[in-house]
Amino acid sequence: MQAKMKFVAVALAGTLAVASAMAQMTPAAGSGYGRMDGRGPPSAEQITQRLTPLKDALKLQPDQISAWDAYEAKLVAAAQARSKMHEAMPARGDRDAMADFHVTMMKFNAQAAEETNLALKALVARLSAEQKATFDVFRPGPGPMAGGRGDGPGHRHGHRPRGNCVDVPAKT
C-alpha cells in the first residue's frame, strides 16, 4: 500500500509539473492547458470542483475532515500561487526571462508537490481500508489519469471505464 501511495504522490507531482510546463509552451499568448476554459493553470475553484466527487465518495468521518481540509488547502494554495505566477509570466519574445520563469515554475512545482505529498500522506493515514481502496481507484474525469479519458491506472489505454470508476474494477 505504501508503494501505491508513493506512486500516487509522484504521479500527482509529475502531472502538476507537466501541466505547468505545457501551459507555458502554448503558442497563443494567454492560452494554456489545465484550466477548463483554456486560460492557464486550473483555478482554486476548479481544483475544489474536481475534488468534490472524491470527497463525497470517501464518505469522510468527522475525525477525518481536518486531514481532508489540509490536503485540499495545499492543492488550492498551489493552484492560486500558480495562477498568480502565470499572470506574471514574461513576454514570449524574451527568451532569457522565459527560461528563468520556467526554472521558477519548476522549483515552485517541486516544493508544492512535496507539501501536497505530506498532506496526502496525513490524509491517507486517517482513512479506513475501504476508503483507501476508494481513493486508490477513484479518477474523476476528464483529464490525465481520469476516468473520463480511460487511460489512467487500472484502465487499458484507449478504453473508457464503464460507469463510476469507484465501483467498477478495471478489466484486464
Image (spheres, rainbow, N blue to C red):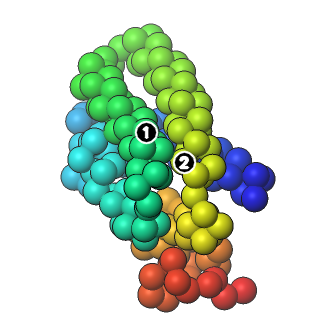
The residue under label 2 is which amino acid type? Leu
Image coordinates of residue 22 in percent, x first then y, are 44, 41
Residue at the (42%, 44%) spot, across then down? 66
**Circle 2 SS class:** helix
In the picture, which quadrant includes the N terminus? bottom right
- Judge left or right: residue 87 versus residue 14: left
Res. 136 image quadrant: bottom right
- Sequence-wise, the earlier of marks 1 and 2 is 1
Query: Looking at this view, is 129 or 50 the one in front?
Result: 129
The residue carrying mark 1 is 70
Label 1 crowd bin: few (<14), some (14–19), many (20+), radius 10 Å: some
Label 2 crowd bin: few (<14), some (14–19), many (20+), radius 10 Å: many
The residue carrying mark 2 is 123
Q: Is residue 106 above or below residue 126?
A: above
The residue under label 1 is which amino acid type? Ala
Please say whether residue 1 is visible from this viewpoint: yes
| Real-space Cα separation, disc 1 to disc 2, in angstroms | 8 Å
- Judge left or right: residue 102 versus residue 46: right
Residue at the (27%, 42%) spot, across then down? 43
Image coordinates of residue 75 in percent, x first then y, are 41, 40
Residue at the (30%, 51%) spot, across then down? 48
Image coordinates of residue 114 in percent, x first then y, are 59, 31
Labels 1 & 2 near each other (Cβ < 8 A): yes
Q: Is residue 142 above or below residue 16?
A: below
In the picture, which quadrant includes the C terminus? bottom right
Q: Which mark is residue 87?
A: none
Q: Residue furthest front?
A: 63
Residue at the (28%, 42%) spot, across then down? 44
Total labels: the figure holds 2
Image coordinates of residue 61 in percent, x first then y, are 44, 60
Please say whether residue 106 is visible from this viewpoint: no
**Circle 1 SS class:** helix
